[in-house]
Amino acid sequence: MPKNKVGAHIRAEAAKTVHAVISNGRSLDAALSNSEKKSKTVDHSLLRLLCYGTLRYYFRLRGQLNFLLTRPLKAKDRVIESLLLVGMFQITDTRVPNHAAVSSAVEAARILGKPQYTKLVNGVLRNYVRHGIRDKDPEDPEGQLNHPQWLIERLRRDWPDDWLEIIGANDARAPMWLRINRTKAPTVEYLNRNSIKGKVLRGFDQAIRLDKPMPVNVLPGFLEGHVSVQDAAAQLAGPWLIGDGGKFILDACAAPGGKTGHLLEIMRSGGALTAVDSDPNRIVKVEETAARLGRDATIVVADSARSSEWWDGRYFDRILLDAPCSATGVIRRHPDIKILRRDDDIAVLAAKQLKMLKELWVTLEPGGRLLYVTCSVLSEENEEVVQIFLDKHDDAKENRLLPNNNIRALMRKRQVGYQILPGTEDVDGFYYACLEKLCSKTNERHV
């Protein structure tokens, strides 16, 4: 196939993938997986670059496109709008010559079965370059800040002094962080032995930020369990939870298994870990992680918020609740979140988080510890959930101690718990609240 045809096929596939997210509400991961399975000859790395980049700057690109289209496209032809956005991203943010980006997009319109739009695609993309639209700020606030209005408003309310920095961090490309299995080798030794260039972050004993990302399958020692891919902020969960305990541990929302694997690496000899998740497809990743690390865990497919369906009555002394959330702290890794998430989702998620917290508290032994974690930056999912729980439970108190003092500068102390904002030391955004159980009886105050 001629080179220009190959390029056009990649652009057409990128347009279909972006369209699946924007118009059909599919997650980028699911849409990309589907595209890659169907198009095995396509350059998957370029496909991912185009899709991630277009969705990362979707609101800005959409605002600029409004300068160029006199009227919206028909619903049945909206894939052409996605093709235009892909072409605009390529012109603005890649090294492909403008003329090549335009011609490949025109040919992609034919591949998509929309030859009647070739002139429009050609004209719009040429005008994008010719009239300097690529450098022009959109007229709408969503385009100017490259975020949906509901999220802008929540960030301004929850983080009045930091919201612009959060928005900037959300639009950045995320680095690749590793977690070194120190039962195999010290962190610095792993770097030096394998001639890997990266940064060790103070306070994170196992974390390395790579200077340049690399495919997982070429990471030295990955298959042998020497190293895993995990953001540094997520690596706080294991040591924070275990502390000086960890005989019977529950990972309540375990998939895809990053934190489960960390717990298996650092838990005490003779300890037992139970990993629960409701998604039978995603929990396969947990099983694969445990096998790669050479560690045993009891893995259960169940809804952790319904303990009667899976709990055997044996109390846990440590519970990790990495609760389902809006994921607004990891937008830089999942740019489709800005497009798919809605303001109404937050209250629904908060109610689910509180329900899980109450249900799992019953399975925690007196003196035990529960670590509540989200990758959200929104107060309604974080300190507000935990505060409601504390107000209704006399047997619960917050433990304000950090796992180590070296991370104190990264943390934003909240009314309850701590927040790491995205981009701080180039890590993801996470919320942590450590709770301890005071007595053997749950005493919920109904207020």
Image: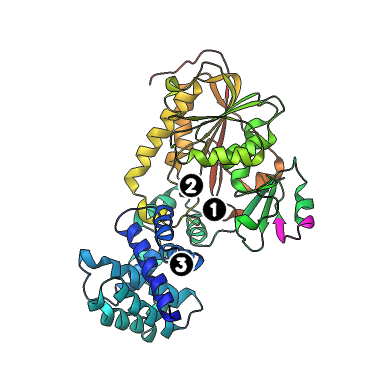
Q: In whole angstroms, how far apart are the C-alphas of marks 1 and 2?
A: 8 Å
- Relative height, residue 165 to residue 118 (above, below): above
Question: 318 left or right of 38?
Answer: right
Rendered image: mark on residue 152: none
Between the residue at mark 3 and the residue at mark 2, the CA separation in whole angstroms equals 39 Å
Left or right side of 111 for 378:
right
Q: Are marks 1 and 2 in contact (CB under 8 Å)?
A: yes
Q: Nearer the viewer, residue 422 or 71?
A: 71
SS at circle 3: loop
In the image, farthest residue toward the top = 441
- The residue lying at 64 percent from left, 39 percent from top is 262
Q: Is residue 414 above or below residue 276?
A: below
Mark 1: amino acid: Pro
Q: Which residues are magenta?
A: 192-199
Q: Are marks 3 and 2 in contact (CB under 8 Å)?
A: no
In this view, the residue in front, 8 or 211, is 8
What is the crowding at mark 2: few (fewer than 14 residues within 10 Å), some, or many (at least 20)?
A: many
Please, is residue 292 above or below residue 9 in the view?
Answer: above
- The image quadrant of residue 273 is top right
Q: Nearer the viewer, residue 357 or 179?
A: 179
Q: Which residue is painted at 33% across and 83% down in the image?
A: 127
**Amino acid, disc 3:** Thr
Indicate which label's residue lies in the foreground, 1 or 3: 3
Residue holding disc 3: 41
412 with respect to 15 (left or right): right
Reading the image, the residue beneath label 2 is 377
Q: Residues within 10 Å of mark 3 (few under 14, many from 20)?
A: few
Look at the numbered disc 1 and give the secondary structure of its residue.
loop
Q: Which mark is residue 422?
A: 1
